[in-house]
């Protein structure tokens, strides 16, 4: 259409149909499912992963990541600005997949430390065991402990007592969820 529907855009972002970038535009489909979707499958079943990249600055690396581990590095050495590929993969574990692109150093066309982009995940279920996330949960509990401590030391930065309490409640609830995940 010729105009953007703000509500439709917000709904897509809330559903996880998005990416972050300071340079490249990324596309990821897993069996036709876009970031934010939950793809159900079966053990040993192959999935078709389609990726695309368009960038204003040359990118050095384009990687497919499954549960935090790089499972495919794409050869984008031609010009680093444009890439398309589709291939079949067998997933052995549930979790998530995302596509990311980045450089190791600054690029003059990008006013940031270095160019980067990442899609949100496509979640995968039924392909194998769930990943053990206890160490990840423990990390976020420790991180939230530091954030809560910092908030408590900066009480003066809040506009009202209610704002301060709401912030601590929000962080405390998040910490509790990570504690549960860590069991």
Image (cartoon, rainbow, N blue to C red):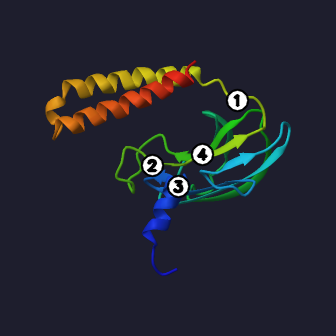
Secondary element at image label 4: loop
- Residue in the image at 25% along x and 28% along y: 151
* Mark toward the viewer: 2 or 1: 1
Q: Earlier in the sequence, mark 2 or mark 4?
A: 2
Secondary element at image label 2: loop
Q: Position of residue 144 (x, y in %)?
A: 38, 26
* Mark toward the viewer: 2 or 3: 3
Secondary element at image label 3: loop
Q: Position of residue 171 (x, y in %)?
A: 36, 31
Residue at image mark 2: 115
- Residue in the image at 72% along x and 58% along y: 32
Residue at image mark 3: 18
Q: Earlier in the sequence, mark 1 or mark 4?
A: 4
Q: Earlier in the sequence, mark 2 or mark 1?
A: 2
Q: CA distance from mark 2 to mark 3?
A: 18 Å
Disc 2 and disc 1 in contact, CB within 8 angstroms? no
Residue at image mark 4: 121
Q: Earlier in the sequence, mark 4 or mark 3?
A: 3
Residue extending furthest toward the front: 162
Residue at image mark 1: 130
Secondary element at image label 1: loop
Q: CA distance from mark 2 to mark 4?
A: 20 Å
Location of residue 104 with respect to 29 vertically, above or below = above
Instruction: Report whether residue 28 is seen.
Output: yes
- Residue in the image at 71% along x and 35% along y: 94
Disc 4 and disc 3 in contact, CB within 8 angstroms? no
């Amino acid at each position: 259409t010729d105009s953007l529907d703000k509500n439709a855009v917000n709904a897509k972002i809330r559903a996880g149909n998005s990416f972050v970038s300071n340079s490249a535009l990324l596309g990821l489909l897993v069996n036709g499912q876009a970031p934010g979707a939950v793809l159900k499958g079966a053990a040993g079943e192959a999935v078709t992963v389609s990726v695309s990249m368009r960038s204003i600055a040359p990118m050095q690396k384009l990687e497919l990541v499954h549960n935090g581990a790089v499972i495919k590095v794409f050869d984008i050495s031609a010009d680093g600005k444009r890439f398309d590929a589709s291939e079949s993969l067998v997933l052995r574990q549930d979790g998530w997949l995302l596509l990311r692109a980045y450089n190791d150093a600054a690029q003059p066309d990008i006013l940031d430390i270095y160019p980067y982009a990442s899609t949100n995940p496509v979640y995968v279920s039924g392909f194998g065991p769930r990943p053990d996330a206890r160490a990840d949960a423990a990390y976020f509990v420790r991180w939230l402990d530091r954030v809560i401590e910092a908030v408590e030391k900066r009480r003066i930065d809040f506009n009202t007592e209610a704002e301060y309490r709401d912030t601590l409640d929000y962080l405390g609830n998040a910490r509790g969820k990570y504690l549960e995940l860590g069991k």
